[in-house]
Amino acid sequence: MAKQVSEVYSDLSYNPILNQLGDLTTVKNEDSIKQSLRTIINTPKGSRIFEPDFGCNVNFYLFEPYLPETGMRIAKDIEYNINAYEPRVELLDIKVEGDSENSGYNIEITYRVREIEKIDTITIELQRL
């Protein structure tokens, strides 16, 4: 059973603005974790100078053929990097589905938030630019 907690995690929002008190807006709890997962997946490995191993190489797979092996490589890359950089979650499942119509992949990640024992899912669409 999930624990009821008012605020466990808090991070700056991707699009921070000043609130009425002059503080930057934040994302909390599940939104904080979802933002972190999106950041890990959408940050190309090597793009952070002081953290060159941070991120995934999933964008490299967007130009590969839509084969089951490609989907498995994307899932393994995501799994490795979430386990390395997001200790707040326990991965339960990663589904990768090719979307040739939109030149990309649809990714569904199911995870458990460790602190509050809540199971949640996030869907991310990767597309060629």
Image (cartoon, helix red, strand yellow):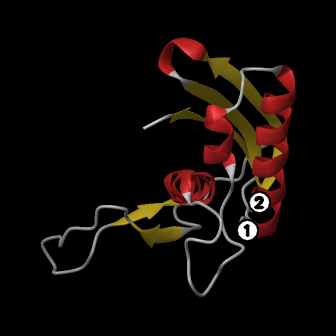
Q: Is residue 7 above or below residue 74?
A: below
Q: Position of residue 109 (x, y in %)?
A: 71, 37
Mark 2: few, some, or many residues within 10 Å (few <14, many ≥20)?
some
Q: Do residues under tags 1 and 2 come within 8 Å of each other at their CB atoms? A: yes
Q: Position of residue 80 (x, y in %)?
A: 84, 56
Residue at 58% x, 15% y is 100
Q: Residue furthest left?
A: 20
Dot 2 falls on a residue whose secondary structure is helix
Q: Position of residue 116 (x, y in %)?
A: 72, 56
Q: Is residue 4 above or below residue 106?
A: below
Query: Please, what is the three-letter code of the amino acid marked with disc 1?
Result: Tyr
Q: In the picture provided, is 77 more to the left or to the right than 64?
A: right
Mark 2 = which residue? 81
- Nearer-the-camera pick, 4 or 44: 44
The answer to whether residue 52 is visible is: yes
Q: Residue furthest bottom?
A: 50
The answer to whether residue 114 is visible is: no
Query: Please, what is the three-letter code of the amino acid marked with disc 2?
Result: Asn
Mark 1 = which residue? 85
Dot 1 falls on a residue whose secondary structure is helix
Residue at 17% x, 73% y is 18
- Nearer-the-camera pick, 25 or 2: 25
Res. 73 image quadrant:
top right
Q: Position of residue 4 (x, y in %)?
A: 63, 53
